[in-house]
Amino acid sequence: MLRPALPLLALALVGTLQAQSPFAPAPPPPSPVPLVTSFPDTPSGKLLTEIREHPGVVQRVEYLADLIGPRLTGSDQLRRAQAWAMTEMKRLGAVNVHEEAYDFGLAWTRGVDSARLLTQNGLRFRVDQLAWSPATKGPIQGEVMLVDARNLAELQPFKGLLRGRILLRSNPDDKRPPLGRRTGDMGAFQAEQSAMTQFLLDEGAQAVLLMSGRKNGLSFTTSGPGRDPKKPAIPTAYVPQEPYKMLLRQVARKEPVKLELSLGGSFSAKPVQAYNVIGEIPGSDKATELVILGGHLDSWDLGTGATDNATGSSVALEMLRALQATGLKPRRTLRVILWSGEEEGLLGSRAYVEAHKAELDAIQAVIVDDMGTGMVKGFDLQGRENCRGLMAMAIAPANDLGVRELSLRVMNSTDHAPFDRAGVPAFAAIQEHVDYFEGTHHSQMDYPDHVQPDQLIQGAQAMAVTTWELLNMEPRLPHGVVTRPTRPNP
Ligand SMILES: [Zn+2]
């Protein structure tokens, strides 16, 4: 829902009351969204006006989050969201609405996780199983031990000491010099990770605890190596910083710290398929060329995936709604894609690029919105300096809304990346950070409460006009694979 517009008098009164109370919360910071009162009578201006005056983009996030909920790839809830998205696409005038399947592997469902100290203060505290890691066999009990080895060599001194232990694998107080920049490819890095896990299993460790990177009691999840049944995996969970650091202090006292831990996630009996949802608005004289606008419909499951990425999915659907409402018809074909498997490694967009190899040349551009509720400030050009001029034209109608940035930065962590690597101009929106990487992203805080309607609406406006300009400009963005140094992800 949009924020209701309060009459000025009421606003003044609220201000006075807040000033009088010593307990009144600090007023929110001013919105970074520039106030633009009217837009020109052009197609882009019409889209900007239409989106500004409609709360649809916010309402859809609330629907997805509050009524469908978390949307783990492989889950029934994501299937419900996909059915809903197809109905929405058709209702909003899209044609050729369909799903495309790809092999996903085993689905995973979160169970009940719990942790309780059997010594010291007896505290029960929050733990969240690393998704796709194996469950514990019921509640297990074990002594807690810090094992902050960073590679296989550093693990060797722990030989013979790990049987039955629950391991603390993060050390926020690490004073050792960093290992230095890793060399070698991703395969070598993953092989060493697997060898380390195999060492822990061979030595009889029972489970691993990791510290959440988020502050203020926030937990975190991501997907573990267990998605590949061929890789060794150990029951693993994230612990918020406060209880994790308490465990470290207790262990440092050199007294036994005994924990009862239960991690209840489960795998599907058989591999499942996952799906991308696709809908189109056919073009006119350049109908064989495509602009792809997308977001990922899947989410993590500690919250309801409101900002990661119901927002981006809703923004993509808003383009369909605004085209329908204004009656505008593009020259190129618009293809809206809501991907899945993004959180497990951009699986949906990778599968899409693989399945549509023959069509990649027909794509004018791909743009993706996946950084939460924050306003759009521009796009990362992925090192494609030769696209700057045309992208500057594409964002020009939204310049006054604060959309001005075209950075050469390479951003690889959302669904435009597989297209980019295949040589297609594909860009992720640069967005204002609003409680994202320190807050809602992958945590139990990801609810619509943290959606800022004015910023989300600005984002929908920015994505819509950029898409519109890309659909209609005469020239084509230059394609080509950009060579860049490769380096394993941290
Ligand atoms: Zn995301």
Image: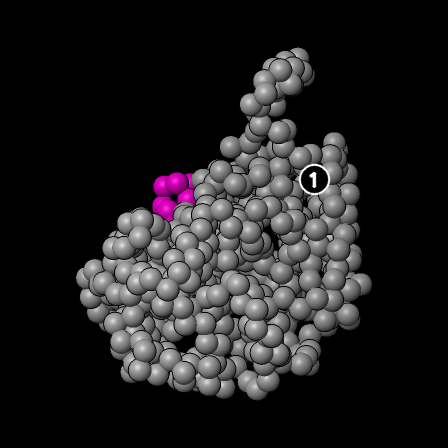
* Residue pictured at 32% horizontal, 78% vertical: 161
Q: Using the image as rendered, state which of residue 97 and residue 112 is in the foreground.
A: 112
- SS assignment at label 1: loop
Q: Which residues are drawn in magenta?
A: 63-73
Residue 378, magenta (yes or no): no
Q: Please provide percent x and percent y for residue 426.
A: 63, 66
Q: Determine whether, in the image, residue 108 is placed left or right of residue 333.
A: left
Residue 377 point in image, percent of width and height: 70, 51
Taking depth in this image into account, of 200 and 221 the one nearest to the observer is 200
- Where does the C terminus fall, quadrant-wise? bottom right
- The residue at the far right in this view is 389
Residue extending furthest toward the left: 138
- Spot occupied by residue 382 in the image (x, y as percentages of width and height): 68, 69
Residue denoted by label 1: 33
The amino acid type of the residue labelled 1 equals Val
Residue 21 quadrant: top right
Q: Is residue 456 left or right of residue 212?
A: right
- The x, y position of residue 107, in whole percent, is 31, 65
What is the quadrant of residue 414 in the picture?
bottom right
